[in-house]
Image (cartoon, rainbow, N blue to C red):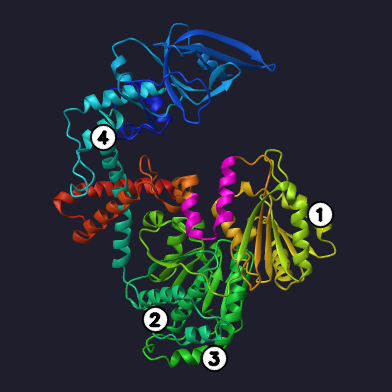
Amino acid sequence: MDWIPVPRRRQLERVGITTIDGLLTHFPKRYEDRTRFDHFPTGDSEEPVCVCGIVKKTSLRRIRGWQKMFDVILEEEEAHALSQPITCRWFNAHWVEKMIVTGQRLVVYGKPKRSGSSVVLAHPEFEIVENDAEVSLHLNRLTPIHRATEGLSPRVMRRLIWDVLEHMEKTPVESLIPDSLDATPRGWALRQVHFPDNQETLAKARRHLVLTEFFGMQLCVAAKRAEQTSQPGASHFVADTLMQRLHAALPFPLTGAQQRAIGEIRADLAALRPMNRLLHGDVGSGKTLVALSAMLLAVEAGYQAALMAPTQILAEQHYLNFLRLCEPLGLRVSLRTGARREDSSALPLFENAVQRVPGNDGIDPLPDSEPHILVGTHALLYEGAGFTRLGLAVIDEQHKFGVLQRARLRNQGVAPDVLVMTATPIPRTLTMTLYGDLDVSTLDELPAHRGKIVTGVRDAAKLPDAVKFLREHLEAGRQAYVVYPLIDESEKLEAKAAATEFAKWQEFLAPMPCALLHGRIAPEEKDAIMEKFRGGETKALIATTVIEVGIDVPNANIMLIENAERFGLAQLHQLRGRIGRGQHKSYCILLRSPKAEAETAEKLRILEATSDGFEIAEADLKLRGPGDILGTAQSGLPPLKLGDPLADHELMRLARNAAFLLFERDPQLERPENQRFRRVLAETRKLMLSQVS
């Protein structure tokens, strides 16, 4: 970038562009067809318009004391019978006042709104068109609009990128993907994505560049997969006596999906390569039972099994469940969190059973002081957790752990088998990216004993009716959750808070006992609160999202969520999963505030219409976009500049197939024609490391 003036280079560096490649992959955010312009609008429009006109007049007025309003009256260049001027309006935009003067030719882009007799474009994007040697670069073409920043307007960025492409005209640009995936020359694609000849060449260029982006990502996934499968492991399965005894003691049969998943996991545990499997299912689909079944298989083979949960409440919930189910089998279960360390007493039943298992002669029984199953939070990652012979690591709510934390748990044993669980249904389009290096088992059916959940969206004004409905169910012996987005009131956010509203609910539901639960309550107090709620002593739990995962109280059949519009779609689905766990019909009431926008109303309607987590995940992806759901800081994925895993899922599939085929044929990328892919892999890994939490 030596030929770019130093001041301009510094401006580029401030937005993270430090190389020619960085500049060329600063792709346009949109394009304006400046071969023809829209006629000036005569009324409101939800769609933005792009128009060109001459500045007839400017005016600056003070409004409401210190605020200033700058108006630009724009006339259409080629006026027609119905043509009338439009007003471009900016508030407190001092830099705009200094740029626009009468007589200039402007291209503006924005949503028109009628205001009295005028049509106004508020804070439109604009560009001053000067009749100079560069006019052909900015007009009479499909014009790229790049993201702008202070000192780097779209016009400046366009000129810079044009100059770079001109410098490169005679330099061949190496393709970063196999020709079998797409043979379009990369240099041509880069020019066309910035300065397309037409819509067809733009689509062809974008396809090549999206495939390039996805291929780099999938190379990393394929390399990681190849590395994992080549690691030496140990077989962690010899028999399933303990698991069969557990299943025989259950009051309900396993679903077909659970049996299928256990079969897939059992095959992985028996193999000599380390297991890396995702157990993926909706709220209440029975993932924990599948995970415990896998843990019993590992324990019966003479190894320890560990489950790591993201919160203390969830870890304690798992610990209590495992204790109840495993003590009759003679197993020692331990809890390890930052605040608690608990061990069940030594039981001789199981050690005798292990020694009699055929094929297990080479494994010594664990010492009496060592637990068979450990449950904990991230405390399991550190010394003193109690691992002697870790054979299986189960990670619950995978997306809440960073990549490096997961790797640290894997390293606690000699390549232990790893089972990852998530109750956040992930659309298949994202499974290829977020969990591309894992084998996937999907629980796509709910157990027959799960109760039906009816969801209703109501205005906040209906709270008295909701309270009456709640009381009726509590008086009939049921229990309820009331959920708030905040712990304490906030001056910045117009939302209700659990601690503030608690006294109100005590009054609403008296004499029935209520309790307050949130993340700042001391661990011992949390335990006591949950114990009383599980035992039925407390009738209603006024809480924050601390109850989002893991709380299992079959008698709780009502959930009321205030300010429901402030929660994410997936989070609301997770919260709703706390009810419907018993045989009683359950009800989820979503109260929205009067100021809730149309977009949030649509989100809540989706929850009202379906309880299918996979449908909700797809809808969430469409509403929020892939960036949020991917959570690159947690996943360690490189940020995507052009591709959209949802809209471009077919291209993601093609890129994945090509990357995995490449590693299958050349696992070390040693062939001369594959040397370039080593550089792609190294560069993408560097990007990934910069994203790891």
What amino acid does circle 1 point to?
Answer: Ala
Q: Of marks 2 and 4, which one's residue comes earlier in the chain?
A: 4
What is the distance, in whole Å, between disc 2 and disc 4 at their CAs?
A: 56 Å
Q: Of marks 4 and 3, which one's residue comes earlier in the chain?
A: 4
> Residue 98 in the image: x percent, y percent?
50, 11
Q: Label 1: which residue?
A: 503
Point out which mark residue 237 bears.
2
Q: Is residue 255 magenta?
A: no
Q: Label 3: which residue?
A: 349
Question: Which of the pair 598/623 is nearer the observer?
Answer: 598
Circle 3/circle 2 CB separation < 8 Å: no
Q: Is residue 174 above or below residue 315?
A: above
Q: Of marks 2 and 1, which one's residue comes earlier in the chain?
A: 2
Q: Is residue 561 above or below residue 165?
A: below
Q: Is residue 602 magenta?
A: yes
What is the distance, in whole Å, between disc 1 and disc 4 at their CAs?
A: 63 Å
Q: How packed is label 2: few (under 14 Cα within 10 Å), some, or many (20 or more)?
A: many
> Residue 454 in the image: x percent, y percent?
62, 61
Quarter of the image for residue 133 reads top left
Picture residue at 27% right of the left edge, 29% below the top: 196
Magenta part of the protein: which range? 598-620
What amino acid does circle 4 point to?
Answer: Glu
Q: Secondary structure at mark 1?
A: helix
Q: Label 4: which residue?
A: 200
Q: Secondary structure at mark 3?
A: helix
